[in-house]
Image (cartoon, rainbow, N blue to C red):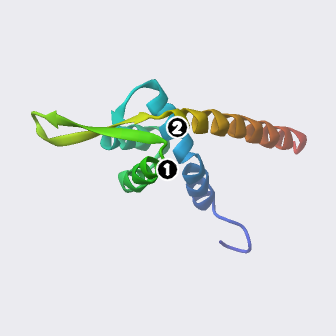
Amino acid sequence: MKDGVASSDSIQVQLKKGALELCVLAMLSRKESYAYEISSALAEAVGIGESTIYPLMRRMQKEGLVKSRLVESSNGPSRKYYTLTHAGRQRLEQQTRDWRAFMTSVNHILGDSR
């Protein structure tokens, strides 16, 4: 932080971290997936690194938001595929509502500041 103002990079990192669970839940609502596939998609879309996904997936599983199953792979080690649980779908619905309300408020403020 320079002169009391957060850098653009710092703000971007915080925004990405804040939206990460929502993004993962949304991806898993469309299809089951494994952590590397999720992290690759997020890296391409919003620049989130692989090291961020694995702890998140463990936490989400511990909280009962996702469940996993091991699938044998002919190309290497087994992969752990994740799917949403009922609690995960409920969390996605709530976070989607919260995100949309937040974005509406921010967009309103930004519109008023021009």
Image position, residue 9 (x, y; %): 57, 58
Amino acid type assigned to the residue bearing label 1 in the image: Glu
Image position, residue 36 (x, y; %): 31, 43
List the residue tagged with mark 1. Answer: 63
List the residue tagged with mark 2. Answer: 88
Which residue shows up at 56% across the image and 50% down it?
16
Q: Looking at the image, which is closer to me, 19 or 92?
A: 92
Q: Residue furthest top?
A: 30
Label 1 Cα crowd, 10 Å radius (few <14 / some 14-19 / many 20+): few
What SS does tag 2 mark? helix
Q: What label sits on residue 35 in the rendered view?
A: none
In terms of image quadrants, where is residue 10? bottom right
Q: Looking at the image, which is closer to me, 26 or 113?
A: 26
Which residue shows up at 37% across the image and 56% down it?
51
Q: Is residue 14 left or right of residue 76?
A: right
CA separation, marks 2 and 1?
9 Å
Which residue shows up at 65% across the image and 71% down it?
1
Vertical side of 3 occupied by 62: above or below: above
Q: Is residue 8 left or right of residue 109?
A: left
Label 2 Cα crowd, 10 Å radius (few <14 / some 14-19 / many 20+): many
Amino acid type assigned to the residue bearing label 2 in the image: Gly
The mark that comes first in sequence, 2 or 1, is: 1
Q: Looking at the image, which is closer to me, 59 or 98?
A: 59
Vertical side of 55 occupied by 85: above or below: above
What SS does tag 1 mark? loop
Are circles 2 and 1 on residues that touch, CB within 8 Å?
no
Which residue shows up at 44% across the image and 32% down it?
28
Q: Residue furthest right?
A: 112
